[in-house]
Amino acid sequence: MLAGVKGNSSSRQLLEHNLAGTINLLEFGRRTGAGLILLSTSRVYSISRLANLPVTIEKEAYRPQLDSYRVVGLSSEGVAEQFPTTPPVSLYGATKLASELLALEYGEAFGLPVWINRCGVLAGAGQFGTPDQGIFAFWINSYLRRRRLNYIGFDGRGHQVRDCLHPRDVAALVFKQMKSAHPQVEHVQNVSGGVASAISLAQLSSWCAVRFGKHSIGCDSTSRPYDVPWMVLDSARAKRQWDWQPTVGIEQILEEIAQHADAHPEWLKTSGCI
């Protein structure tokens, strides 16, 4: 994430929005006894550990070679909560990680219920689509409108992988947490679609080609700070503790976005991309 770094927003503004905003909410909770459910991010995990992950290419996507790379909290199911959070994690990730720590401390100090959900990429119809936020909506809308698209970084062929999750599935978990009377469970959990919803940009383009017809994608292998080749979250803890699992599969998510894109030709302008 290049928020606070690439120039369209200041680092101070990022800190004020993410970290100071969390402090304001926690102070409100301290005064009123309200709890906090914090939607955090996979960007709290160490970028250097993820960037050094050895990968191979299978079916237009990077796949981790875990037999030659041992890191606590990393398995074929993805990145678990024990994975290192040592810097660098980006300024954005650092504000989220600091917010997590403050929320947990406030919870302990003042007896407040606190739940922290480290979310993967959220995706669904009606989402504003930009390259940094809402990549699935951005890519599908841009592909449909035949706007210029580039694979950026790594080998310039779009093999980098992320998982995705529908907001309805996040809402289902949050509702469970709001009603929870079991503060003894773990307070931090990954919340994502996991390996079942993992897809590369190249695979997404192939899906778009079938849905909309072929469109040429450019290549730019220039590396960018904070980019990682493969980021899939393991949500086993959330499934175990909350009897929760995603119900909206990736095909349904992509088709939902595509139908919305068909019906809203102005959506990239509405999202502020053009």
Image (cartoon, helix red, strand yellow):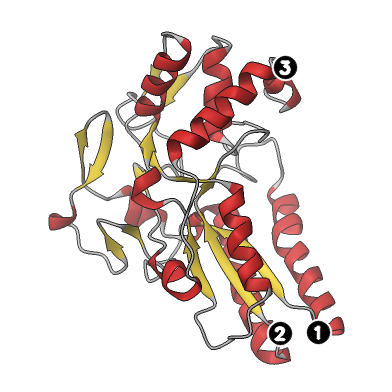
Name the residue beneath numbered marker 3: 266
Q: Earlier in the sequence, mark 1 or mark 3?
A: 1
Asked if residue 114 lies left or right of residue 221, the reply is right
- The relative height of residue 261 versus residue 65 in the rendered view (above or below) is above
Screen quadrant of the N terminus = top right
Foreground pick, 75 / 220:
75
How far from the left and from the top, in percent, is residue 211? 45, 16
- The relative height of residue 12 versus residue 58 in the rendered view (above or below) is below
- In the image, which disc is placed on residue 112? 2
Residue drawn 76% across the image and 71% down it: 23
Q: Earlier in the sequence, mark 2 or mark 3?
A: 2
- Distance from disc 2 to disc 1, alpha carbons, whole Å, reads 6 Å
Q: Secondary structure at mark 2?
A: loop
Residue drawn 13% across the image and 57% down it: 67
- In the image, which disc is placed on residue 33? 1
Q: Are marks 1 and 3 in contact (CB under 8 Å)?
A: no
Q: Are marks 2 and 1 in contact (CB under 8 Å)?
A: yes
Q: Secondary structure at mark 3?
A: loop
How far from the left and from the top, in percent, is residue 144? 55, 14
Quadrant for residue 122, please give it: top right
Residue drawn 63% across the image and 85% down it: 181
How far from the left and from the top, in percent, is residue 267? 70, 22
Residue drawn 47% across the image and 75% down it: 241
